[in-house]
Amino acid sequence: MDGLFAQILTTAFLATFIRSVVPLLLTALGGLFSERSGVVNIALEGLIIFGALAAAVSTQLLTPSLGQAAPWVGWLAGMLVGGLIAWIHAVLSIKYRADQVISGTAINLLATGVPAVVLTALYGVSNESPKVEYALPLWGAGELRFSPPVFFAFLAVAITWYVMYRTPYGLRLRATGEQPGAAASMGVNVRRMRYSAVILSGVLAGTAGAFLSIGNLDSYVRNISAGAGFIALAALIFGQWKPLGVLGATLLFGLLQALSIVLGGTNLLPSTLVQALPYLITILALIFTGRSRAPKALGRPYDG
Amino acid sequence: MLLFPLAALGRGFSADAVLLHVTGSVMNLTSNQQAPLPPTGTILALAWATLAALAVTLAGAWQRQRWFWVTGLLTFGLATAAVVVLGGALDDQTKRVLADTTLRPGAKRQLGNFYASGGMNLGLFLPALAGLIAAGAGLSVRPRVWQAFNRMRSLLVPAAAIGLAVLVGAVVVLIVQPSVNQSGTPLSLWGAWLAKSDLVYFVYSTLFAPVTALNPLLDSLKLATPLIFTGLSVAFAFRTGLFNIGAPGQLTMGAIAAMLVGVYGPPSLGYGLLALSVLAAAAGGALWGAIPGLLKARFGSSEVINTIMLNYIASSVLVFLIGSDSFPFLGREYPQPLKAEGSNPQSELLNGEAQLRPLLEVLNVGQNGQVALSIGLLVALAAFVIVRLLVRKNRSLIALAAAAALGALTWRIGIPVTVTGSQLNGAFLIALLCAAGFGMLMWRTAAGYALRAVGLSPKAAEYGGISVAKNTILAMTIAGMFAGLAGTHYVNGGALDEYRLKQNMPVNVGFDGIAVALMGQSTPAGVVASSVLFGTIDTGAVSVTTKLAKVNSDIVTVLKALIVLFIAAGGFLSRRVTAPPPPALVAAASRHETPATIDLSKPLTPQPNVAQASEDITREGNK
């Protein structure tokens, strides 16, 4: 047991912790925009995967011509593809009034098939992309060296808070999610607000994907997200759909993930069962969260 | 028709083909440039006639003539005739090859397959389809036909979704797969297009091919079995306005429970052990489904997230139980008793009494090693349907008795067939029973009425005295039970090649269940039908994978996802098309009046919108 505590109180553990938090935080902030506008976004998991794939593949393809700048373009590509796929979800659930959970599930199912097809077409293997020559650079000192999306993630919390509570856009977005009819009567374009919010969620989830594939690792591998999108969704609920709440929730979930990584390396508990701990904790956390704070129009297509 | 090749006159192993275009030009992409080709004169003549008929049909349809269904039917008939003539010509070639004594056996088989794999192509298939659609559209002017079509309206969205998914899939194949050319001569732009469009047809014809022969059909039914279970599971929850993404986890728990009873239960029970094992699978799944149901009813936590989390937990439990020989606990190593010895992650073999034997073995009434399938089941089914239609009073009971009697009488009569063995097992029958039970419970009992009421309007249901919380738990428990029973297919049915639980059990069929349930419009018959369809393309995907370099079974995963996507969008069809016309409109039309304003924006026979119902159930359940 002493060994475990000694391991936890190191900077290496702190680095693991922060790396576990970042994808959850970025994705949950994305989900915050979407759900505050009234669109359930269960597609986050798929959006991470598409972002990760796009980032890794475009970095790999652009390295010969761009060199060290390639991963930055890869990050951009991850954001763009994430936004594009989120746009599909937006079209279905806003324009075609689709069942938002089903349309999100369709995106997640696509994310289990499309990467394999793309990778087979490009490289002839279906479950991973070749390693990129240059991943995103690491900034920092000692063991605490992180790729840029990490800093971006924590900056994004502040930006999200400011946008949500201090700008007209944020006010309109929140109104759209609570009472779309009332918002529309005040001249807010409900559909446009929802489109922008869903696409923004795709951009943020795409960034989380880019972090996983070219910021944390150096290639895309199958199942790279390992349920991060769903845990982020749970963190969003646990954080009561508020930017600071989301930060707190993802810090908690990230800590548990990092703990399970460290615990899995010891012989205290079977590592296979320890891997399931974050998922179990997620269920427990949801028990202690009421749903009363959910945006009132969540999941409802807007008829106006 | 001008854009696509008419037919493939022969095809090599890696999908390289000899293509015939409607202009009569032949393009040989195979390595065998000297292969003699069947005569094409009649086929081309029929093809031109088809083209003419199609043009006349289109002109007639454009001017809204009353007769264009005749030419539509004619188009279909001519195209079919061309296909038949082509098939005959290719058959002649195959026979010629078989009769040829100068060929070595290997070369003979190769050349025989070369002709046998030929057949119609997009150039004949599309006009036939267009002709059929035109005939249907033309005939729908008549009230009786219109009413018949009207009853099938609910098939529109799934059909449109499949059509769109096939279209997008075709584009993917066009982009991804380079044209197969083994002739050595480079292709012109036009030739490359013909070769590519041939590949699209080849991919789809191979995907849907398994329905045409007995053995692949049995394989399809085998792959369809778990899909029926998980499809029913998702559909059941849908009907109550809940979304069960937890079928993979419920399946895993069901399989583990079935294995525990099947391996460690007392063999002295005889077939009771099998029954017990099947019940255990149901209980394991039901437990895993009840947890999110309970959490939703009690604490209002989202069943969507909870079921997903339980999937991950179940897969961890599975790996823990049979993944490795020992596990550490508080610093010491303990042996893992459930895992079988050896390097493979799997459990011990099941007792013989707990095994569901292959259906071929059960239905085989042939003697002396001959395989002959009993016709008893088919006769019983036919008797049931016919008697039920004829008798008026107590018809279900009388029909059941008649079916049982006739089935028992004809049990000994068999049709000799040639099959190479198939792992289609008794789980398939359990699946069909479950489908029937789903229908009975949902539409013939008060409990089913309550469940559907909660799905359509939780608020109204609560007001009407139906407990939303209780029905939420019930729905998730039964949904979990269906998914758990899928475990019997893998463990008791030996679908993983051996009668034991293995770590590589394909739990993703749980996610396929979502597509199946949506395709089947959450009805039991629809679920069974779409499961068979998906089982078919899953089987076909195996042969596509072996033949093409860049297209493999992942394309099927994409197709299924696209189907879900397009169904979510209602097939991009207007509600005016998909919803049955409101009675007021029909009445007004029959009196030749213009109806008063009718709101067509809402579906009239609604299915729950789970994203919306899920929130409502939470709000109602938490009051």
Image: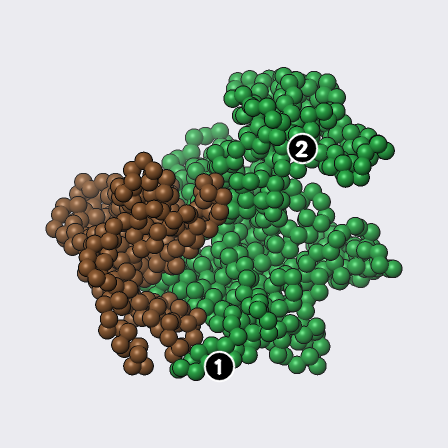
Chain colours: A brown, B green
* Near-viewer residue (A199 or B185): B185
Which residue is pictured at 57% across the width and 20% down the height?
Answer: B2
| Residue B52 position in % (x across, y down) | 62, 17
Q: Is residue B388 above or below residue B127?
A: below
Q: Secondary structure at mark 2?
A: strand
Residue A218 falls left or right of residue B483: left
What kind of residue is marked 2?
Answer: Arg
Query: Residue tagged by mark 1?
Result: B334
Quarter of the figure that contains the C terminus of chain A: top left
How dense is the environment of label 2, judged by Cα within 10 Å: few (below 14), some, or many (20 and up)? many
Which residue is pictured at 34% across the width and 54% down the height?
Answer: A217
* Near-viewer residue (A113 or A98): A113
Query: Residue tagged by mark 2?
Result: B11
Which residue is pictured at 66% across the width and 30% down the height?
Answer: B31
CA separation in Å, label 1 and label 2: 58 Å
| Residue A172 position in % (x across, y down) | 18, 47
Q: Are the residues flagged by discs 1 and 2 from a single subunit?
A: yes
What kind of residue is marked 1?
Answer: Tyr
Which residue is pictured at 40% across the width and 69% down the height?
Answer: A276
Residue B538 falls left or right of residue A79: right
Depth-wise, is mark 1 or mark 2 nearer the camera?
A: 1
| Residue B380 position in % (x across, y down) | 75, 56
Residue B599 falls left or right of residue B119: left
Is residue B411 in sight in this rendering? yes
Mark 1 belongs to which subunit? B
Q: Earlier in the sequence, mark 1 or mark 2?
A: 2
